[in-house]
């Protein structure tokens, strides 16, 4: 099996089997046949090989990015204009996707970037409450009930044959702390490198986007495996 087929199969099977706290909705774009076709096109385009990638983990998908396209940190605009995958999804930009694709473009474009890196999230499914994005750690009850799902999801993705020497964590606060604590128990990775979360950069440090991009590239270029 190619890495693409493994990722596609993983996404097809994504589900949370525990009861989610009241008034919280799960974002699962993979249940939509139209969206899933976009997911298949994306991964078949960029991961149709058996090269081991280095993992970059966000928090969880948002309703304007991965929560609608099924592709982490990729909104419908980036999917069409940068990745060349046409879609009929509402063309609304996402701040986090804006920054990530700024990094991707400066790295050398999506073909080069995705040849070395695989982006996912600590929780590969997202959440909303009262129509607004919700982080998995915002509500203690939600975080606790998701632990088994998160551990299982990480184990299944690492079974793709991903690089376990290093993982890049998007979010230097709660997301890094949670992932670091999990790693202490499960030993998923030898090293976890925290990076500022893209939304924090775009919302509070927009004037320093170029500086943050340079910092990201410096760290990402520090450990690149299977370059060809």
Image: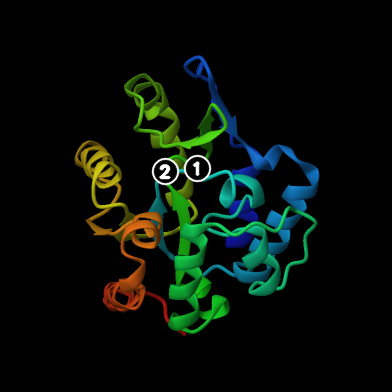
The N terminus, quarter of image: bottom right
Please state which of residues 23 and 225 is positioned toward the viewer in this rendering: 23
Q: Tell me the number on the disc at residue 154.
A: 2
| Labels 1, 2: front one | 1
Q: Considering the numbered disc 2 on the image, is that residue within a helix, a strand or a loop?
A: helix
Q: Is residue 40 shown above or below 45?
A: above
**Within 10 Å of the Cα at label 1, are there few (<14), some (14-19), or many (20+) other Cα atoms?**
many
Q: Is residue 76 shown above or below 140?
A: below
Q: Residue at x 48, y 62 (%)?
A: 118
Q: Is residue 18 shown above or below 207?
A: above
Please state which of residues 198 and 155 is positioned toward the viewer in this rendering: 198
The residue indicated by pointer 1 is: 124
Total labels: the figure holds 2
Residue 212 x %, y %: 30, 71
Residue 54 x %, y %: 39, 64
Q: Residue at x 50, y 80 (%)?
A: 105
Inter-mark Cα distance, 1 to 2 = 9 Å
Q: Residue at x 34, y 55 (%)?
A: 200
**Within 10 Å of the Cα at label 2, are there few (<14), some (14-19), or many (20+) other Cα atoms?**
some
* Colour mode of the rendering: rainbow
Report whether 93 appears left or right of 173. Answer: right
Residue 84 x %, y %: 71, 73
Label located before the other in sequence (1 or 2)? 1
Report whether 56 appears left or right of 219. Answer: right
Q: Quadrant of residue 198?
A: bottom left
Residue 108 x %, y %: 49, 84
Report whether 51 appears left or right of 166. Answer: right
Q: Quadrant of residue 75?
A: bottom right
Q: Quadrant of residue 26?
A: top right
């Amino acid at each position: 099996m190619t890495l693409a087929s493994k990722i596609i199969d993983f996404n097809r099977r994504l589900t949370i089997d525990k009861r989610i706290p009241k008034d919280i909705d799960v974002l699962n774009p993979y249940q939509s046949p139209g969206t899933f076709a976009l997911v298949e096109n994306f991964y078949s385009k960029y991961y149709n090989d058996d090269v081991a990638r280095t993992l970059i983990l966000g928090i969880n998908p948002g309703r304007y990015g991965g929560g609608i396209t099924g592709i982490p940190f990729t909104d419908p605009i980036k999917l069409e204009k940068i990745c060349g995958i046409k879609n009929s999804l509402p063309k609304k930009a996402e701040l986090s996707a804006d920054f990530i694709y700024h990094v991707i473009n400066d790295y050398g474009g999506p073909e080069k970037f995705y040849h070395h890196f695989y982006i996912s999230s600590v929780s590969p499914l997202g959440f909303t409450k009262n129509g607004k994005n919700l982080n998995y750690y915002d509500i203690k009850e939600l975080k606790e009930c998701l632990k088994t799902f998160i551990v299982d999801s990480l184990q299944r993705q690492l079974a793709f044959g991903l690089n376990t020497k290093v993982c890049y964590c998007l979010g230097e606060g709660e997301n890094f702390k949670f992932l670091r604590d999990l790693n202490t128990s499960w030993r998923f990775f030898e090293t976890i490198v925290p990076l500022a979360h893209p939304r924090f950069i775009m919302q509070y440090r927009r004037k320093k986007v170029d500086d943050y991009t340079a910092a990201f590239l410096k760290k990402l270029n520090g450990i690149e495996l299977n370059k060809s």
